Image: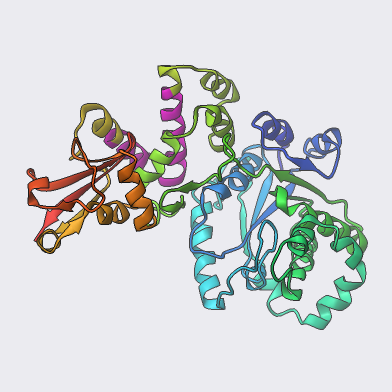
Amino acid sequence: MTTAPTLNLYDTLEQRGLVAQTTDTPDVLRARLSQPEPVTAYCGFDPTADSLHVGSLVPIMALAHLQRAGHRPIVVVGGATALVGDPSGKTEARQMLSREQIDTNAGCIGDQIGRIVNFTDTPGSDTPAAVLVNNADWLADLSWIDLLREAGPHFSVNRMLTMDSVRSRMDAAGSGISFLEFNYMVMQAYDFLHLHRSHGCTLQLGGQDQWGNIVMGIELGRRLADASLAGLTLPLVTKSDGSKFGKSESGNIWLDANRTPPYDFFQFWRNTADADVGKFLGYFTFLPIEEVQSLAVAEGPALNESKAVLAYEVTKLVHGEAEAAKARDAAAKAFGAGDVTADGVPNQPLPKPRLADGVTVTELIRDAGFASSNGEARRLVQGGGVRLHDTKVADPFHAVTADDAPDGYVLLRVGKKKLCRFDLVD
């Protein structure tokens, strides 16, 4: 026996700013999500790396809200579509990966999503378990001729050329879009058709850049299965200053703790710009919307507390409560009480022979991940933002010696919010 959802997913997503576009009007989609039977909805993730980055948290959170509202999520890991490469949001073709790489990446990504979306049936629960599938299971062995004959007659090339994901590549300088990538839209549309046939899926979620792919899937489902399908896109996250979300000086902020340690992950959110705090609390936490709104309007010291709440909640979501507490406490000790030896403070071993051979502060800045090049590291020093312990460094070629490690470590500080402890080892 199924239980009707107690919350309307559309209203939850709208309150949190997570609705960009819908193929139905809001009232029609709200009614679709209010039916007695739970809705089955899917979102796809292409395994182009062994970890997702924080931008992928938006669709993951949408799936989690869907599940909490009593609906059934399907997570599609694109083992087949990753072999082609999604041109959406890209100015050039993606790097081609082997099937072995993609299979490995798919497993890692499934594990990461599983921390937030529940794939396990809970006895006595009205919340449906999510389903994890890989589109290689139905696309990889489908012959090109079979796909063309079944789906090809229902795609208008003229229509496909109007889609942003295609048009933006054709208008951009460079090689345009390859025939390989042009077929991505057909494959994703076929995913929706297959999931409708096999799982009764009637709703697709995706980023704003997936609008064209979603629309074509809805049309293919209508033509081949007489299906009433719908789509909802989620906003692409941007910062209030226009800079790219999810980047730090050392690159992407990843969900994998081996790529981005929990402390660095926590600090990324702790350093959120004032204007973005409310938006990110709505996007990336499960805090009640009333609490989100209260934290969002805080000012002065209270706003700093809102940032701490944001950092803790997102780190807890991705890395667990223990790691979130460790990162929070380490940051409080390092930047509050000045205890840089606390467990969790970023640290690296620094072999003593390197000091004897001569290591510059520029090298340490790069080792710490605070700059991606020597030139960038030198500019940080020249800008007056680099210190060894509490002493400002004026010379980017300053040679770090044992004198800079009186307590057995070299403490590198960059700006007011970044530090790394280099522990001397034999």
| Quarter of the view holding residue 366 | bottom left
Q: Is residue 418 left or right of residue 143?
A: left
Q: Is residue 177 left or right of residue 352?
A: right
Residue 117 in sight from this viewpoint: no
| Quarter of the view holding residue 5 | top right
* The N terminus: image quadrant: top right
Residue 46 percent coordinates (x, y): 61, 62
Residue 158 percent coordinates (x, y): 91, 64
Foreground residue among 293 and 128? 293
- Residue at the spot 14% in from the left edge and 47% down from the top edge: 409
What type of secondary structure mainly makes up the magenta span?
A: helix
Foreground residue among 240 and 27? 240
Q: Is residue 264 above or below residue 159?
A: above
Q: Is residue 29 above or below residue 230?
A: above
- Residue at the spot 79% in from the left edge and 38% down from the top edge: 36
Residue 149 percent coordinates (x, y): 88, 78
- Residue at the spot 69% in from the left edge and 53% down from the top edge: 42
Foreground residue among 2 and 175? 175
Q: Which residues are magenta?
A: 304-330
